[in-house]
Amino acid sequence: MIRRDLVDAMVRHARRDHPDEACGVVAGPVGSDRPERLIAMVNAERSPTFYRFDATEQLRVWRGMDAADEEPVVIYHSHTATEAYPSRTDISYASQPDAHYVLVSTRDPDSHELRSYRIIDGEVTEEPVEVVESYMFSHTGADDVPDAP
Amino acid sequence: MAVTVSVPTILRTHTGGEKSVDASGSTVAEVIEDLDSRHSGIKGRLVKDGSLHRFINVYVNDEDVRFAGGLEAAVHDGDNVTILPAVAGGCAGS
């Protein structure tokens, strides 16, 4: 489950960086499995076929998440000429077994494809994506708080 | 030199679940050797053919050791060594 504004922001980022691959994370409270704070990352490779978080930026962002008791709930990137399905490269480098790997395909200029996967020990499992306006009215637990405006 | 090493989730199987462990050494290579003596197998996840694995980032305090001599980068008493798997991928190979 993910908020529509976060989905829209991922797609906008992917379109903005097209034809290079775009990448980023959506952080959420540790253990909540609830993506809340989108951080668009620099693709250090600036490539249409490869992405890699800039190592210095990654450290800063990971420290920021640690300090805020957050973890990377979503790791997203775009494929700019192929479908939104993890490539062999994506699978071999996937190092966050707790994260949802979201792929956005921007190969069609008029419509995007957005899909989500778990990648654990080289095994890919697609999962349904439920887009909601707000987590407040969704059944995500007793500790729901209103979303930031 | 006593340092603290921050261990990413994916390597905590080697550290009994600990996210932060103590180690010693005067270079990154020595710290990794020392880690491996107590947390068997961790070196093989970090080092390949005598250099840092391409998709592992190691930082001494805030500095990416790739720009500070790689495995030979110096560490000092009280430094924090952070290990983070690089986040990478892409459509090549699809």
Image (cartoon, coloured by chain):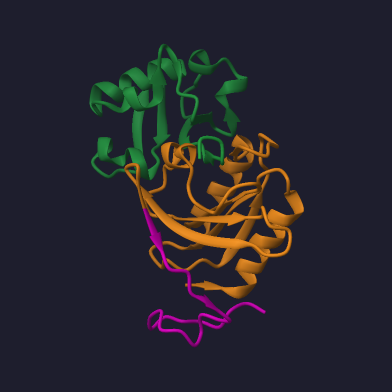
Which residue in the rendered view is the most extreme toward the right?
A: A16
Tag count: 0
For chain B, give the colour: green
Q: Residue A82 appears at what percent x and percent y?
A: 59, 48
Which residue in the rendered view is the most extreme toward the bottom?
A: A137
Q: Residue A77 appears at what percent x and percent y?
A: 58, 50
Left-right relation of A106 to B39: right
Image quarter of the N terminus of chain B: top left
Q: Residue at x 70, y 43 (%)?
A: A20
Q: Is residue A111 above or below residue B45?
A: below
Q: Residue A143 appears at what percent x and percent y?
A: 42, 80
Dominant secondary structure, magenta: loop
Q: Is residue A129 magenta?
A: yes
For chain A, give the colour: orange
Q: Where is residue B49, by image quadrant?
A: top left
The magenta segment is A125-149
Q: Is residue B81 above or below residue A64?
A: above
Q: Residue A89 appears at what percent x and percent y?
A: 48, 37
Left-right relation of A111 to B6: right
Q: Where is residue B30, by image quadrant?
A: top left
Nearest the viewer among A76 and A78 is A78
Q: Is residue A69 visible?
A: no
Q: Residue at x 64, y 46 (%)?
A: A81
Q: Residue at x 42, y 11 (%)?
A: B50
Q: Is residue A144 visible?
A: yes
Nearest the viewer among A88 and A51 is A88
Q: Is residue A115 above or below residue A85?
A: below
Nearest the viewer among B19 and A73 is A73
Q: Is residue B88 magenta?
A: no
Q: Where is residue B37, by image quadrant?
A: top left
